[in-house]
C-alpha cells in the first residue's frame, strides 16, 4: 500500500500497515517519539491500520494537537486511579480541554473528594504511568459493551451507549483499555501511558451530568499534563501569577466591586468601581459622538412576539429570563439587536437618512448556569457597548472602516493593539453565495485598505454573516476576544428592514453589529488582570493621594484637594495620624498613581512634593503646576 507524506513523497508499506509501521519505515528516531497519525484531518492511534492512498502526518510531541492526546491519556489514568482508590465510584466522561483535562465522577454516598486527596490519587496515577501501560483499542458490538458496563454498574456509560444508538444508529463502539481500566472512548490515545512526562491534579468542582441542572451532580476533577517537567513548572508559575491578579480577589481588595449570593452573576459596583465603569461609558459616548453615532434607549422587557420575529424564542430561549404579564409571555433582552431593529422599523427611511448608527450602553441579561459564572468574566447581568449600523449596501465598506478606526482609537487609550481575525462563511448559513462573496470581500478590503494583518478563520463566521473579531493578548499571554464587527443578512430579512432608494423603490438595508469592549464588566475584569490592578491614570478611581506629613499640614493638603477637585481630578487626603513612611507605603499598596507629600516647606510655598507609583520621588513643583500637568495627561487618556 501507499500513503503520501506531507512533503508530497510516496511511502510504500506492506498491506495493512499501521501508523507505527510508517513511523518505523521513516526512521527509528521518529518511531520513538511518534504519538499518533493524522489522516483525512483525523488523529488516529499509531496501532490502527493506515488509510490507503491518503496523506499521512506523524504526530509527535511538537505537533498541533499532541498535548490533547496525552491529556486525554491522563484523564483515563486518573479514572483508573480513582476506581482503584474508591470502589463503587461511577465514571462518566473525561475529555482533554484547553490547558488540561478533567474527569467527572459519581462517588458513592458519603464519599467526598477534595484537593487534600490529590497526593494519594497522583501517586496511584504515577504507578500507572511508570508501568507504561499500552492503550489498547477494541471495537465491540453495542450489545457486548452494554452488557459489560451494566455488569459493572456503570450507568453513565450505559446511557451514553444507548444515546449513541438512538442518535447515530451505531452498531459497534470502541473501548480503550490501559492496565486494569477500560473506558468507552472514541480515542485517539498515545501508544502507552509513559508518554505523559509530567502531570498534576489541580482542582475539584461540581458538574451536572450532561450539563443538565435537573440531573445528577457529579464531582469533576481537573488536572493538566505535559511532555516535560519544565513545561508543567512554567504553567504552574503562570497560574500563580494569574491567581495573584485574579480580578475576583483584586476587585474587592481595591474596593471596586463585590459579589453576593443574593444576585448570582451580577456585580455590586462600589463607588470606586462605578467610577471606572462610568469613565469607560463616557469614553464610548465621546467616541460615538465623534464617529457619528446617535445614542438610543430601548426597553428591557419585550413581548415574546419580538423574540419570535428575531428567532431567539426558538434558538436562545434557555438563555433568556422569561416572565409574563396578564397572561402574555415576556422576556428580558439578552441582546440589543432586536430592539434596535424594532426601533429602526418604527420610522420610514430614505437613502438620504442613511447610515443610521444606533448606540446603546444596553443592560442585558443572560441565563447562564450558576456553575459557569466567573466573576466579571461570565455574568448574567451586564452592559454592552453595543451599536448597530443600518446602511445601504454601497455604504458598507465605509462603515466597516469607520468601525475599525473607532476600535483602534478606543483601544489606544489602554495601550491595546488588537489581533484581528476574519471569520468567513460557515457550513450552515443563510443567504446566497454571491452575497457572502461580496460581504467577505468588503471585510477583507476594509482590513487591506488599512494594511492590517489578520488571520482568516475559514468557516467560523456566524450563520447570518461574516465578521471581524478583535482579540487582545494580555500580560500573562492569555487571549481575550474584545470587539467584533459583524455583517448580518438575517435580521434585515426577519424584521423586513428597508429604505427608499433614489429610484423611489424599497431596498433591503445592510445591518452591522459592533461592540468594542464587549461588555463593560468583562472588559474591566480583563483590564484588572492584565494590569494587576494598576489601571491607566485616566481610569484610576483615585488618581492622587495627598499626604500631609504632620497634622498641622492637613489644611494645606485640603487646599490641594480642592484644586484637584476643581480640575475634575480624583484625589484622597490621608490625614491619619501616621508616619509619612506608613502613608506612602499604604498608597503604594493601593497602587495609587500619584502621591503628593506636604510638609513645612510645601505648606509655606504652596508647592507639593511629587511621588509617582513605581518611579518614586520626581521632585517638587507648585501645586497649580501639578494640577495643570495632571489635567492635561488625563484629558489625553494616555495608556
Ligand atoms: Zn477517552
Ligand atoms: Zn447586535
Image (cartoon, helix red, strand yellow):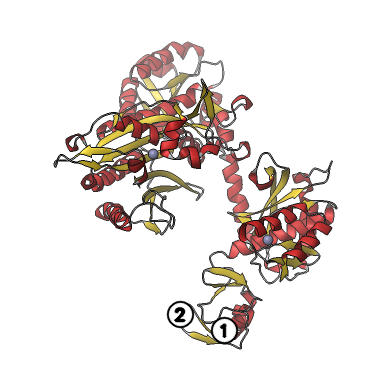
**Residue 477 or residue 295, whichever sits in front:** 295
Is residue 268 in view from this perspective?
Answer: no
| Quarter where residue 370 is shown | top right
Q: Is residue 241 above or below residue 296?
A: below
Q: Which residue is mark 1?
A: 26
Is residue 240 in view from this perspective?
Answer: yes
State which tag comes first along the sequence, 1 or 2.
2
Cβ(mark 1) to ligand 1 < 8 Å?
A: no
Cβ(mark 2) to ligand 1 < 8 Å?
A: no
**Label 2 crowd bin: few (<14), some (14–19), many (20+), radius 10 Å:** few
Mark 1 residue element: helix
Q: Which residue is mark 2?
A: 7
Labelled disc at residue 199: none
**Residue 171 or residue 387, whichever sits in front:** 171
Question: CB atoms at circles 1 and 2 under 8 Å apart?
Answer: no
**Residue 319 or residue 106, whichever sits in front:** 319
Residue 582 located left or right of residue 177: left
| Quadrant into which the C terminus falls | top left
**Label 1 crowd bin: few (<14), some (14–19), many (20+), radius 10 Å:** few
Ligand 2's quadrant: top left
Mark 2 residue element: loop
Q: Position of residue 573 (x, y in %)?
A: 47, 18
| Quadrant into which the N terminus falls | bottom right
Amino acid at each position: 500500500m501507499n500513503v503520501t507524506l506531507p512533503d508530497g513523497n510516496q511511502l510504500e508499506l506492506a498491506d495493512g500497515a499501521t501508523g507505527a509501521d510508517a513511523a518505523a519505515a521513516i526512521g527509528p528516531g521518529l518511531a520513538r517519539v511518534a504519538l499518533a497519525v493524522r489522516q483525512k484531518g483525523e488523529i488516529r492511534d499509531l496501532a490502527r491500520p493506515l488509510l490507503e492512498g491518503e496523506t499521512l502526518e506523524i504526530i509527535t510531541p511538537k505537533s498541533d494537537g499532541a498535548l490533547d492526546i496525552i491529556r486525554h491519556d491522563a484523564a483515563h489514568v486518573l479514572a483508573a486511579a480513582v476506581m482503584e482508590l474508591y470502589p463503587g465510584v461511577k465514571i462518566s466522561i473525561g475529555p482533554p480541554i484547553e490547558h488540561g483535562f478533567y474527569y467527572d465522577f459519581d462517588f458513592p454516598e458519603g464519599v467526598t473528594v477534595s484537593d487534600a486527596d490529590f497526593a494519594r490519587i497522583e501517586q496511584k496515577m504515577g504507578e500507572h504511568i511508570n508501568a507504561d501501560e499500552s492503550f489498547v483499542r477494541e471495537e465491540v458490538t453495542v450489545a457486548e459493551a452494554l452488557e459489560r458496563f451494566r455488569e459493572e454498574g456503570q450507568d453513565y456509560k450505559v446511557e451514553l451507549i444507548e444515546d449513541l444508538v438512538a442518535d447515530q444508529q451505531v452498531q459497534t463502539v470502541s473501548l480503550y483499555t490501559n492496565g486494569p481500566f477500560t473506558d468507552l472512548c472514541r480515542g485517539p490515545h498515545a501508544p502507552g501511558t509513559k508518554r505523559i512526562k509530567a502531570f498534576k491534579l489541580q482542582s475539584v468542582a461540581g458538574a451536572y451530568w450532561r450539563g443538565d441542572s435537573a440531573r445528577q451532580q457529579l464531582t469533576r476533577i481537573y488536572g493538566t499534563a505535559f511532555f516535560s517537567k519544565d513545561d508543567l513548572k512554567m504553567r504552574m508559575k503562570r497560574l500563580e501569577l494569574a491567581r495573584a491578579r485574579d480580578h475576583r480577589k483584586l476587585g474587592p481588595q481595591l474596593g471596586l466591586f463585590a459579589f453576593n449570593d443574593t444576585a448570582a452573576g451580577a456585580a455590586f459596583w462600589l463607588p470606586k468601581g462605578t467610577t471606572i465603569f462610568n469613565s469607560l461609558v463616557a469614553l464610548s459616548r465621546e467616541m460615538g459622538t465623534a464617529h457619528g453615532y446617535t445614542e438610543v434607549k430601548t426597553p428591557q422587557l419585550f413581548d415574546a412576539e419580538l423574540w419570535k420575529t428575531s428567532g431567539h424564542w426558538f434558538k436562545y430561549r434557555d438563555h433568556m429570563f422569561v416572565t409574563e404579564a396578564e397572561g402574555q409571555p415576556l422576556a428580558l433582552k439578552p441582546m440589543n439587536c432586536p430592539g434596535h431593529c424594532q426601533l429602526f422599523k418604527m420610522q420610514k427611511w430614505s437613502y438620504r437618512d442613511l447610515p443610521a448608527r444606533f448606540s446603546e450602553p444596553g443592560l442585558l441579561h443572560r441565563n447562564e448556569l450558576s456553575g459557569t459564572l466567573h466573576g466579571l468574566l461570565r455574568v448574567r447581568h451586564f452592559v454592552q457597548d453595543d451599536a448597530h449600523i443600518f446602511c445601504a449596501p454601497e455604504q458598507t465598506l465605509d462603515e466597516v472602516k469607520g468601525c475599525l478606526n473607532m476600535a483602534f482609537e478606543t483601544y489606544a487609550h489602554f495601550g491595546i493593539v488588537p489581533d484581528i481575525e476574519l471569520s468567513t462563511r460557515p457550513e450552515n448559513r443563510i443567504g446566497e453565495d454571491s452575497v457572502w462573496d461580496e460581504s467577505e470581500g468588503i471585510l477583507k478590503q476594509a482590513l487591506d485598505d488599512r494594511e492590517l494583518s489578520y488571520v482568516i478563520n475559514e468557516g467560523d463566521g456566524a450563520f447570518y454573516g461574516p465578521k471581524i473579531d478583535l482579540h487582545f493578548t494580555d500580560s500573562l499571554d492569555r487571549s481575550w476576544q474584545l470587539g467584533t464587527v459583524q455583517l448580518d443578512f438575517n435580521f434585515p430579512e426577519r424584521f423586513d428592514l428597508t429604505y427608499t432608494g433614489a429610484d423611489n423603490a424599497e431596498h433591503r438595508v445592510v445591518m452591522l453589529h459592533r461592540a468594542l469592549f464587549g461588555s463593560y464588566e468583562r472588559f474591566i475584569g480583563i483590564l484588572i488582570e492584565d494590569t494587576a490592578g494598576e489601571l491607566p491614570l485616566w481610569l484610576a478611581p483615585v488618581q492622587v493621594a495627598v499626604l500631609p506629613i504632620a497634622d498641622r499640614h492637613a489644611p494645606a493638603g485640603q487646599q490641594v484637594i480642592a484644586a484637584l477637585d476643581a480640575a475634575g481630578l480624583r484625589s484622597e487626603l490621608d490625614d491619619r495620624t501616621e508616619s509619612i513612611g506608613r502613608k506612602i507605603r499604604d498608597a503604594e499598596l493601593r497602587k495609587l498613581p500619584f502621591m503628593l507629600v506636604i510638609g513645612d516647606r510645601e505648606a509655606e510655598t504652596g508647592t507639593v512634593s511629587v511621588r509617582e507609583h513605581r518611579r518614586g520621588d520626581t521632585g517638587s513643583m507648585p501645586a497649580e503646576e501639578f494640577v495643570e500637568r495632571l489635567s492635561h495627561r488625563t484629558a489625553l487618556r494616555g495608556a
